[in-house]
Image (cartoon, rainbow, N blue to C red):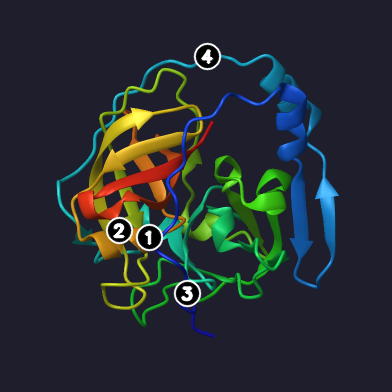
Amino acid sequence: AQPSRSGDSTRIAPKGAPAAPVDELIDDLTAIKASRGGKKMEVPLPEGLRLMLRNPVKQGKVTPKPGGGKLVQIKDTKEFPYSAMGLLGSGCSGTVVAQRFVLTAAFCLYDVKNQKFYDNLDFFPAINGKDMPVGSVKWKDVYIPKGYAKEGALEYDFGLVVLDKPIGDEVGWMGFGHLEDFNLKQANLTGYPWDGVPSQTSWQTVCTIDAAEANFLFYKCPGEGKVLAAMTGSPIWYKGQQDTDWYVVGIHNYAQDDKQNSWWALRVN
């Protein structure tokens, strides 16, 4: 089956809000898990993560080495890190971040209005038009935060798709992490737009970071507005100083102001 294209390219930009009490945050970060057979359940936050939230650890600075300065097509999607990026059956972009896990936006996985998960969440890594180097990978389970499932809270707009085979062993996977002292001036945005470009093709641009808040990143990117707006679920990422340092620091969502080419991502925190 070929992945479908769908989605709304307009959403209200997030606004800063006071940090939630830790106990409320822990509840909102409880996972809602759905399996391919239709079973749903809640999965409590692991104790280690609860301790992390109560006792945050600061991390050091990392200097990025971004590429060019315009929206360009990725011609060789089989080359890492592009091999670890792909298209979900829901029409959104996703990134392999472990052997079986794909990181994307919760918006791409769950219909808040109808309170249900989307049916087609199979993953097409490194797809390039009609060329599918490793075919499609069926989804097994999917996770989103309870805080998003309740009412679509933007600060919880992230999710994980669990695949039925360890595709990361074949295509590789990206790291992801939180920068306490966020000093990135630029970062890469790579994904599969559902509008404005040939179907099922990968595109990249280098974005200028305007601000880094607790839950969100704000930035401007070269490229046509409708194309950038259609890259939901794509990673905001950078390459560190070592060959093994490839980090996703945000998940691209929607326009803050598409006419002024101003965008926001959920920050990995």
Where is mark 3, residue-wise? Answer: 6
Quadrant of the rendered image containing residue 67:
top left
Give the Cα separation between the discs numbered 1 and 3: 11 Å
Circle nearer the N terminus (3, 2): 3
Circle nearer the N terminus (4, 2): 4
Q: Position of residue 160 (x, y in %)?
A: 62, 53
Q: Position of residue 52 (x, y in %)?
A: 68, 21
Where is mark 1, residue-wise? Answer: 231
Q: Residue at x 49, y 78 (%)?
A: 3
Circle nearer the N terminus (3, 4): 3
The secondary element bearing badge 1 is classed as loop
Where is mark 4, residue-wise? Answer: 58
Toward the viewer: 132 or 200? Answer: 200
Which residue type carries mark 4?
Answer: Lys
Tell me if label 4 and label 2 are in contact, CB under 8 Å.
no
Give the Cα separation between the discs numbered 4 and 2: 32 Å
